[in-house]
Amino acid sequence: MTDHYAVVGNPVAHSLSPAIHAEFARQTGQDLDYITLLAPLDGFAACVADFRARGGKGVNVTLPFKLEAYRLATRLSVRAEQAQAVNMLGFDAGAIFGDNTDGAGLVRDIETNLGFALAGRQVLLMGAGGAARGAVLPLLEKRPATLVIANRTPDKAHALALYFARRGKCAACGYAELAGRRFDLVINATSASVRGGPPPPLPDDIFAPGALAYDMMYGKALTSFLRFAQAHGAARIADGIGMLVEQAAESFFIWRGVRPETAPVIAMLKTQDRGSRIED
Ligand code: ATR
């Protein structure tokens, strides 16, 4: 019998998740289908309940419903609890399990796919919204020398650093306070470059020798942050396509107990037309 999965969002038509999961299913011989579900902005819970009633086994959750999904889950993983956001739900008889695979996907892309070990590195995370929040714990677990969270509204970065203070070495600041600092890894978790806007205001000399610039977003063209990085001495740049595929693989693994190969799927997507933002 075919098992049913979906990605729920609004908008969701652009989602690459159905293609990714179809490829995982083909590769691992799992009997499942995976569709997009457009939920009304005020109808997320009803949409999920309906899919579950029709035999759905689980869903991925994309913007703007990650917080609602967190509230809907009756059981949460530690990382979802810490992120206060859920991007995957699994249904069984009496419970709705909520997890957050975004941060794990980010770290796996950085360490395994890009070969960049986080331990002992100077890491800068830009942003203090939902995307940044999901990344903090998985990054700290890799024991960087420092994790600095920089945000346009510094108070939000300070609140985030305080929340995770027990989990590792974590500091916060506004962009102006980055003057004179150098980082081995700079991650963009802001929505600044969405729709072609300028990147966050980083000092020109922010990248240490050999530094990696990582944008959680992706698009047909380089994001403004990655263009800035190229022009200001980053040794390597990467967009969010690898993270997108890795968070999907982590969801697939939790649902199905089988870990798919991500490299061929990342390669496939890199040669195709793409959307503009990691949102699934
Ligand atoms: P998401 O869930 O994608 O993280 P969000 O919660 O709305 O979305 O957070 C957006 C993040 O991008 C915030 O950190 C925001 O900074 P503020 O907290 O100061 O609003 C950041 N951001 C958005 N536009 C930006 C810009 N033009 N420059 C710098 N940071 C920006």
Image: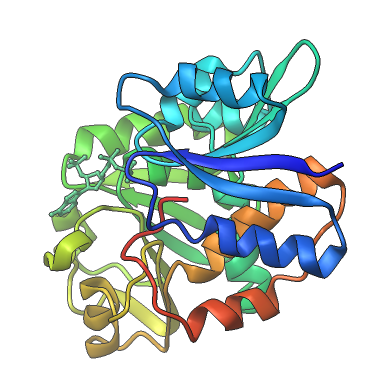
Q: In which quadrant of the rendered image does the N terminus lie?
A: top right
| Residue 278 position within the rendered picture, expressed as x and y whole percent measured from the top left | 41, 57
Residue in the image at 22% along x and 32% along y: 155
The quadrant where residue 224 appears: bottom left
The quadrant where residue 106 appears: bottom right
| Residue 91 position within the rendered picture, expressed as x and y whole percent measured from the top left | 72, 25
Q: Nearer the viewer, residue 83 or 173?
A: 83
Q: Is residue 217 visible?
A: yes
Residue in the image at 21% along x and 60% along y: 194
Tell me if residue 110 comes above or below residue 273 in the rendering.
above
Q: Is residue 118 visible?
A: no
Tell me if residue 154 comes above or below residue 98 in the rendering.
below
| Residue 267 position within the rendered picture, expressed as x and y whole percent measured from the top left | 59, 83
Q: Is 85 positioned to the left or the right of 172 in the image?
A: right
Residue in the image at 59% along x and 76% along y: 266
Q: Is 62 positioned to the left or the right of 97 in the image?
A: left
| Residue 90 position within the rendered picture, expressed as x and y whole percent measured from the top left | 70, 30
Tell me if residue 209 comes above or below residue 274 in the rendering.
below
How many tags in the picture? 0
Q: Nearer the viewer, residue 113 or 166?
A: 113
Residue in the image at 21% along x and 63% along y: 193
